[in-house]
Image (cartoon, rainbow, N blue to C red):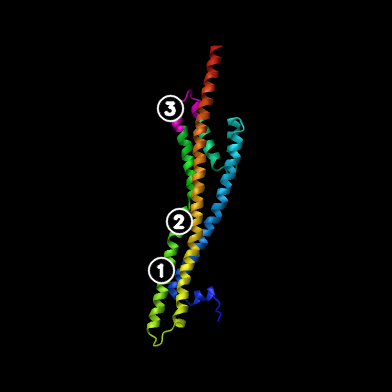
Amino acid sequence: MKTELSLGQLFLDASLLVQLIMLALIIASLYSWTIIFFKVKLFKRVRQYTDAFEERFWSGKDLMSLFNESKAQKDPTGIDNIFTSGFREFARMHKQGTLNDMQWDAIQRSMRVNLNRELDTMEDNLSVLATIGSTSPYVGLFGTVWGIMSSFTALGSMQHATLALVAPGIAEALFATAMGLFAAIPAVVAYNRFSNEVVKISNRYENFVDEFVSILMHHAASKTEEKQEGTAT
């Protein structure tokens, strides 16, 4: 004997509380997929911008030209914001003369503020994915336990109990656990992937800040030497 499994019928036959739990899991799943969709687009955009900027930066282009290009962008993001904030601070302080250690720290701090702001944007809503991934199985399990309890309670009032009577109620209850896993698994996978992406991009940003400060120090030292040679002649 072949019995077709209808997910819609399982939902309709479930008790009100189990139906509410299923609806909550469906909403959580849709919300997590919305976050996943936007995060995939965001990280793809960040990687493309970072690759393009690093290619321009290490091509030997003049820093002022690079600064003007980054500043002229309509929607600068990521490494462009870090670069423009650092170079703007450097240009402002360098006009006052030779930079001391406190001024170099201020330049680096300015870049790190923007770096942390960019990381906050990338990490936004990741905690939601983590929450959905960790709690959805338990929410579904609660629905399952409640459904099974209801089935056995109803079974206890019958004189002749058979598997055919209790099986539909158990199937409806187990459906809640399946929905909990359906909501949790993509959220967990996406959270782990996006967290790894944040770490990789953070390392690239951190390396750039250190390298850029070294370049600025070398640039400032060269300008100082040129002024000294000009004064001597």
Query: Which mark is on residue 209?
Result: none
SS for callout 1: helix
Q: Was residue 96 drawn as part of the magenta stretch in this picture?
A: yes
Q: Please state the extent of the stretch shown in magenta in the rendering.
A: 91-106
Give the Cα separation between the discs numbered 3 and 1.
59 Å
Q: Disc 1 marks which amino acid?
A: Phe
Query: Which mark is on residue 130?
Result: 2
Q: Quadrant of the N terminus?
A: bottom right
Residue 162 placement, left or right of 73: left
The picture places residue 163, in percent across and down from the top left corner, at: 45, 81
Camera-nearest label, 3 or 1: 1
Q: Quadrant of the C terminus?
A: top right
Are dots 2 and 1 in contact, CB under 8 Å? no
Number of other residues with Cα within 10 Å of mark 2, as a class: few under 14, some 14 to 19, many 20 or more? some
| Residue at which label 1 appears | 142
Residue visible at 54% across and 42% down?
78
Residue 54 appears in the picture as rendered: yes
